[in-house]
Image (cartoon, rainbow, N blue to C red):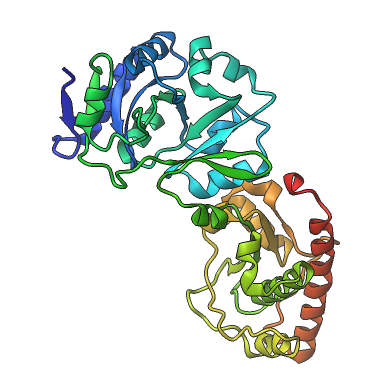
């Protein structure tokens, strides 16, 4: 019988994780909690661990899942995923969503996984991937040299193993270690989403289709310094122009798969937009008075698909802190020029600023809607 180790009551939870990592390194199987269910895990690159996982599972129709720290690690194995798949990884992980991804050209690194491991991970040509959101397994993965192979989180009837005892009773033989952290947070399995150029719920779970619709939306983020003049104008105007192109109201944009936001590199929380900005947009049929400033955060950067800055300095500042987002951030001006801050410069400068923002937004929008979705 598997002996469970209470994670919270341990003198030092780090010792529990270190023991688990050593067992994984030796080819053993460890039971971990996730936020949705308990799973058994072994090193995906270890032939012995993969064989034991297959034996532990017995006969099951569910595939195993490749557990990764984040979307960056996935690219090491499956580099040709769609932008939509990468978007869902950025927004959903770590979290209760499993992505079933098809990649026609997996890397040589994927081919180094044991053959039986690849067969456990694939179903209908798709690899199941997930970054689980529980500190125990996340910390273990941080210390492991490669991804983990997680056994299915569902029993034969589709229900989740929501306690350590349920997982211990599910396998064909005892696990080498079982990390017990009580009943799982959601007590329900993750939602499995098949994704390429579009998405579809393959197996229902914690996350609803309505939430997935929001998470899969394409996000445009406009950035300036204080988020009270230029970027709010760009946000409001782009929302209006996009709605006109799609022949819907701006309130319907999320239902059409689009989200528009703005932020400032030095913004405070909740500041009102400048009166000049409000007046300019009001004259163009858009109410900016309810806008509240927000600072640019790493979370916003990770969620955004298209980041437009008002100046080259803004762009450089973002890339200094987040060099990995270079393909998603650019200056708003199509000529690569700065759009200067109009604060304190009078109404004429605001008008010039507005006209430059509008001109470039129209160019961006024309190019954007002319692209196939998979290329965006």
Residue at image point 81% right, 81% down: 352
Q: Hey, which residue is sitting farthest front in the picture?
A: 157
Q: Can I make out residue 259 in this image?
A: no
Residue 64 to residue 88: above or below: above
Query: Which residue is at the front of the view, 14 or 84?
Result: 84
Question: Residue sitting at 29 percent across and 44 percent down?
Answer: 187
Which residue lies at the image location 55% right of the left edge and 34% below the top edge? 100
Give the vertical position of 141 relative to 334 (above or below).
above
The image quarter containing residue 228 is bottom right
Does the rendering let one see residue 156?
A: yes
Q: Position of residue 181 (x, y in %)?
A: 22, 38
For the N terminus, the image quarter is top left
Image check: 157 left or right of 347?
A: left
Tell me where residue 289 appears, x and y as whole percent: 59, 86
**Which is nearer the eye, 137 or 375?**
375
For this view, does 346 lie left or right of residue 59? right
- Give the mark count: 0
Q: Position of residue 4 (x, y in %)?
A: 17, 27
Quadrant of residue 133 within the rendered picture: top left
Q: Quadrant of residue 229?
A: bottom right
Q: Position of residue 49 (x, y in %)?
A: 38, 13
């Amino acid at each position: 019988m598997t002996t469970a180790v209470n994670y919270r009551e341990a003198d030092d939870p780090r010792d529990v994780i270190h023991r688990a990592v050593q067992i994984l390194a030796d080819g053993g199987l460890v039971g971990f909690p996730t936020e949705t269910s308990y799973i058994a895990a072994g090193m995906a690159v270890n032939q012995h661990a993969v064989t034991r996982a297959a034996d532990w599972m017995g006969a099951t129709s569910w595939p195993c899942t490749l557990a990764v720290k984040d979307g960056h690690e996935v690219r090491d194995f499956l580099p040709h995923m769609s932008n939509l798949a990468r978007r869902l990884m950025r927004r959903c992980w770590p979290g209760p969503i499993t992505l079933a991804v098809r990649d026609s050209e997996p890397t040589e690194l994927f081919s180094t996984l044991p053959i039986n491991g690849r067969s456990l991970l694939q179903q209908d040509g798709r690899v199941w991937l997930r970054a689980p959101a529980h500190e125990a397994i996340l910390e273990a993965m941080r210390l492991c040299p490669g991804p983990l192979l997680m056994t299915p989180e569902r029993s034969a009837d589709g229900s989740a193993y929501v306690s350590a005892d349920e997982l211990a009773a599910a396998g064909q033989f005892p696990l080498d270690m079982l990390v017990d952290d009580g009943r799982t947070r959601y007590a329900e399995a993750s939602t499995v989403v098949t994704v390429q150029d579009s998405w579809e719920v393959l197996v229902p779970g914690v996350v609803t289709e309505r939430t997935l619709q929001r998470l899969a939306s394409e996000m445009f983020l406009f950035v300036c310094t204080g988020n009270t003049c230029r970027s709010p104008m760009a946000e409001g105007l782009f929302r209006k122009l996009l709605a006109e192109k799609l022949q819907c109201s701006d309130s319907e944009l999320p239902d059409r798969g689009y989200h528009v936001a703005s932020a400032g590199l030095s913004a405070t929380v909740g500041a009102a937009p400048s009166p000049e900005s409000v007046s300019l947009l009001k004259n163009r049929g858009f109410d900016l008075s309810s806008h509240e400033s927000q600072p640019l955060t790493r979370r916003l950067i990770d969620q955004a698909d298209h980041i437009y800055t008002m100046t080259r300095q803004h762009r450089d500042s973002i890339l200094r802190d987040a060099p990995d987002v270079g393909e998603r951030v650019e200056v708003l001006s199509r000529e690569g020029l700065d759009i200067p801050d109009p604060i304190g410069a009078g109404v004429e400068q605001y008008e010039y600023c507005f006209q430059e923002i509008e001109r470039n937004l129209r160019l961006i929008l024309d190019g954007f809607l002319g692209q196939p979705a998979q290329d965006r």
